[in-house]
Structures are given as C-alpha cells and as structure tokens.
Image (cartoon, helix red, strand yellow):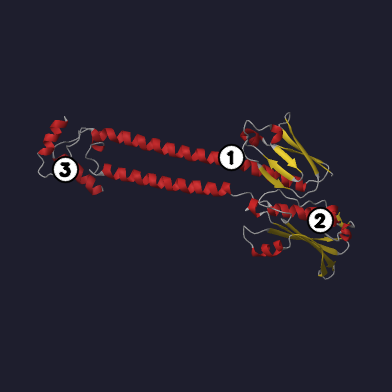
Amino acid sequence: MIKRLDKKAKSSPKGHEKIFHHNFFPKNRRGENILTENLLFIILNFVFLTVLILFLVSKVGNAAVLEEKYSKQIAMIIDSSRPVMTVAIDMQDAMEEKEEGVLENNIVIINENVVTVKLREEGGGYSYSFFNDVAVSSYFDSTKNKFIINIDRK
Amino acid sequence: MNKQVKSTLLSVYSKGHEPQNLGDKIFHCNFFPKNRKGADKVLSVYWFVVLFIVAGGVVYMVAVFYGAPYDVREVEANLLINQIADCVATGGSLNGNLDKLVDELTLLQICKINFKVEDEFSWKEDQFYVNISSGDFDKTSGMISGLTEKVVLGNSELKSFCELGGKTMPKCVERSFYVSEGKVIKIFVGVKKVDKNA
C-alpha cells in the first residue's frame, strides 16, 4: 500500500508536492483520526477540570486554614465571655482533617492567654492571644463530640 | 464559508457522484472545506492555552484568598471596648470604677485585661492601645464639654498609624456612650497584630 502511494507521489510534477500530496497517506486515515483526536481532547479536558476541582477542595478544607480559623474563633469567644461560663464548640471539620498522630485532647491547647490549635504532627500549630484575663481550661467531650471551654475567674 | 460548501457540493454533483441519501450528503468527505482538519488542530492548541490561563487565574485567586489571614482586629477592638465599657458602667450608670482608673496598672487589674501576646514575630506587649476619656454632656443643648483623657494604655504610636489607613496598618475603633450621671465616656482602641491579620 505504501509502495503504491510512493509511486503515486513520485509521479507528482513538482518535488515539494510529493510529501504534501493528498494521496501520500491512506484514504481512510482522516476519518479514524477525528475520533481519536476528539476523544483525547475530551479526556484532557476532563483531566484538567478534575485537577482544578481537586486543588480547590484541598485548599478549602486545608488543615492550616482550619488551625487559623479555630484559634482566632476560640480567642474571640474567650474575649467576649464573662466568668463563669462554659462554651461548647463543634469542630467536626477539624476532627476529620487532623492527622492520625495528633491526640484529640491536644488539638486545642490554652496556655496562659494564648490559644493554640494543632491539627498537623509537624509544626507548632497556630496561636492567637486573647486579652480577657480569665482562667480557661478546655477538654474534648467524646460523648458530645465537641470541645468544651470553661471560663472562670482568676 | 457557505460559498465554499456550496461550491464543493456543486462540484460533487456535477462530477456525477450523487449521494444516495441525506446522511451521505451531510457526512460526505467533501462537505467541509479541505483545510478544516488543520484549523481544528490550531483551535485545540488555543483552547488549551485559554484553559491554562483560566487555571492560572483560578489558582492565583484561590492562593490569594486562602493565603490571606482572617482579619479579626476590628472584632477584637470592639470586644475590648465592650470589656472596658462593662468595667466602668453597669446598667447605664457609672459603677465607681472610672475614678479608680488612674494608671495602666489599675486599668489592667480592675477591668481584667491582659495584654500579653504570643511569642511570635518578636511581638511585645505593644500590640494594643487604649484611650479612655470622659466629659460632661448637656442634656438641653446636646453638647459635650470638658472632654479629658482619663487613662492611656499601650502603644500610643498606633493612633497615628491608624489615621494613615490601609490593610497593613493597625485597626482602630472609637465608640462613646452616655451614662445617667450626665457624662459621656469615649473609648478609643487600636489593635496592631498586623503579621497575623493582614
């Protein structure tokens, strides 16, 4: 088949037209390629969109973002509270995002007037201070699946 | 384009290759101009260029949005004002604490405030500024007179930086309230903490 096409190509009047002659390739090649090219195009588009969505999902539920969000939120809650108070915080998304090595009771650490939230094994977590001069203690209530913060007088 | 298709179809008919049915007419290899395949390839390359530009834009926007910290300084300043207001007045009347506030130490002790911050970004106890002033309020004319500073606490430089405005500057909030004794209390609070909020 190729030999036959080569002969045809050789019989072409000009040299440079040999390669670009419309009979240089088999006749049905064009029809086969349309399907393959379109399929490849659609698959690449899907791959692109999937990677983009995965990137967005990974950024939205990122442990670092949650650490910052919860440490600031807890600090603001303590600042707005008055002794004696008990506050329960639902941190379901943080519990799902935390790494296996991090213990539930070590997720929220309150030392003097600094709140530290740690969801990753590496790094020191995210800390934020509160100005309210109160005695604060926290623990994880596994029955209610919530963090309990007790605010008392110093 | 239409002219090209028309002429192509006419040439096909004139050569005697008459298609047998409508499907053959439309899907005949000569229905479209000959260079359509090349144009498609160029189009798909441009399509991917556009896709990558869009992806770059999305990645940049997401990185900027989620990379920027939550700015809670204004909330913090308002909470500090609330704390001081609750400290000096109860139920719309002065509770006697305002006269006891003579210096920084008394304010911190009486109003239960602690300005110690986390040991990061070489922060010291200079992240806050509080200015409490009081004056007389004339109920008939509605005028404020004799407004004097009672206590000034923290980093006084924050006040001038607040006036400059901008995201990387400290945030300041000023609020006043009236008490039944015919006085007006004005509380000005500035919060720095730029490294963690801007």
Percent coordinates x, y for residue A46 in the rendering: 43, 37
Closest to the observer, B17 or A57? A57
- Kind of element beneath mark 3: helix
Mark 1 and mark 3, same subunit?
no
**Which residue was labeled with disc 3?**
B11
Mark 1 against mark 2, which lies toward the viewer? 1
Percent coordinates x, y for residue B21 in the rendering: 23, 33
- Kind of element beneath mark 1: loop
Q: Residue at position x 16%, y 40% from top?
A: B13
Q: Residue at position x 66%, y 38% from top?
A: A118
**Which residue was labeled with disc 2?**
B85
Q: In this view, does B194 lie above or below A9?
A: below
Amino acid carrying label 1: it is: Asn
Q: Is the residue marked by circle 2 packed among few (<14), some (14-19), or many (20+) residues within 10 Å?
A: many
Closest to the observer, A12 or B164? B164
Closest to the observer, B196 or B186? B196
